[in-house]
Amino acid sequence: MRILYLGDDWVGSNARSLADGFRQAGHEVVVLDSTPVTLPARGSAPWAYSKVTRRRAPWRVDRLHDEIERAATAFRPDLLFVFKGVHLDQQRLLATPAPLRVHYSPDDVANPDNISADYLAHESGWDLVVTTKRHNVGELKARGARQVSFVRSAYDPAWHHRAARRGTREYLAGFIGVCRPDRRDRLVALARRYGDRMLVRGPGWRRVPELRGTGATVGGPVYGQSYSAAVAAITANLVLLNSDNRDTHTCRTFEVPAAGGLFVGERTDEHAELLREDAECLLFDDPGELTEILDWCAAHPDRAELIAAAGHRRITEGGHRYVDRAREIVATLAEVRS
């Protein structure tokens, strides 16, 4: 197919990885970058506008839609694929000349942060809505979505692979991800317990005063291959879910083992389906059980490494790349067309 693909096209973004997955699956793909709308540069006029109004800058939105329309005229796509385009003009998107139009939602579509009034008003106009949340399927159908497909998150071999450590520093435990209220207290408590054996990286963590003085290493986000290098320095890589999205798995579910890290995550049905507990991952229900796991890893690093290796094999041999997800979506589209 000829696919006109709209999504955030920065290095390490899931949207870029999925676009590459369609290309690897044999399709002709033209990518248009939505980042200037969704993530305007800090301090810019569009950024200031979004902070004041909680809406995206309309002049940036219009500029992107003009680009989409020019590209559609020149490229004549078989498929318009939009990766989380809820902040764009839905009527203009659905008027794009293409036989099929798909909207991909990587986050919980019942969470108000992941939808807009305009998107909800036009959701039924999409030929297919793809969600990475199993619980969203019934909810989307009840809202009137025409066709819905559940597709799990994935990993990108270009970024998520075994990598050499950058430096000699090693950590017993680490978390790489966004600072969120449902993670903050747990990570602070672990940092107080494990001190300089703890690594915390991601947006927002350097603004948490409670982490100062714990001895933990705290840094900003890492993307792409830098993410895999950070994983390589950690014995137990924490996979913490987003409660606002009602996550039962996340991108890290695949990225951590693909990068060779030991998966230490919250116990959910999906995690149990994907990885065998105590053989390919370590799972916990509460802070006490997590502490027991980390203390066990400290006492048995060789056994922890064997579990990490088994998890790496399970994920990398299990068809969990973005190209595999692209093929799943295309197979669903074949059913929609028939």
Image (cartoon, rainbow, N blue to C red):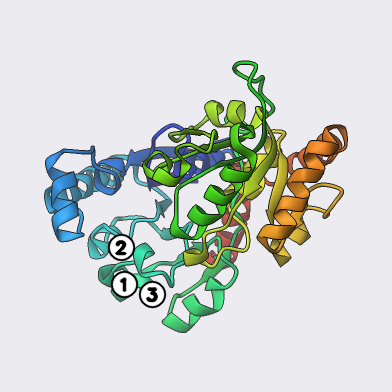
User: Residue 44's x, y, as percent?
Assistant: 15, 38
Measure the C-alpha gap from mark 3 to mark 1: 5 Å
Amino acid type for the residue under numbered disc 1: His
Q: Is residue 259 above or below residue 294?
A: above
Residue drawn 71% across the image and 54% down it: 290
Count of numbered circles on the image: 3
> 243 or 152: nearer the eye?
243
Report if the CB atoms under discs 1 and 2 are less than 8 Å apart: yes
Q: Residue at x 70, y 36 (%)?
A: 261
262, above or below 123, in the image: above
Disc 1 target residue: 122
In the rendered structure, the answer to whether residue 239 lies left or right of residue 1 reads right
At horizontal 44% and vertical 31% (from top left) the residue drawn is: 11
Please say if 128 is above or below 307: below
Secondary structure, mark 2, is helix
276 lies left or right of 101: right
Is tag 1's residue or tag 2's residue first in the polypeptide sequence?
2
Q: Residue furthest front?
A: 213
- Within-10-Å neighbours for mark 2: few <14, some 14–19, many 20+: some
| Observer able to see residue 220 | yes
Residue with the most extreme top position: 167
Q: Which mark is residue 124?
A: 3
**Residue 252 falls left or right of residue 108:** right
Instruction: Measuring from the top left, give residue 284's x and y in whole percent.
Output: 73, 58
Q: Position of residue 320 (x, y in %)?
A: 68, 46
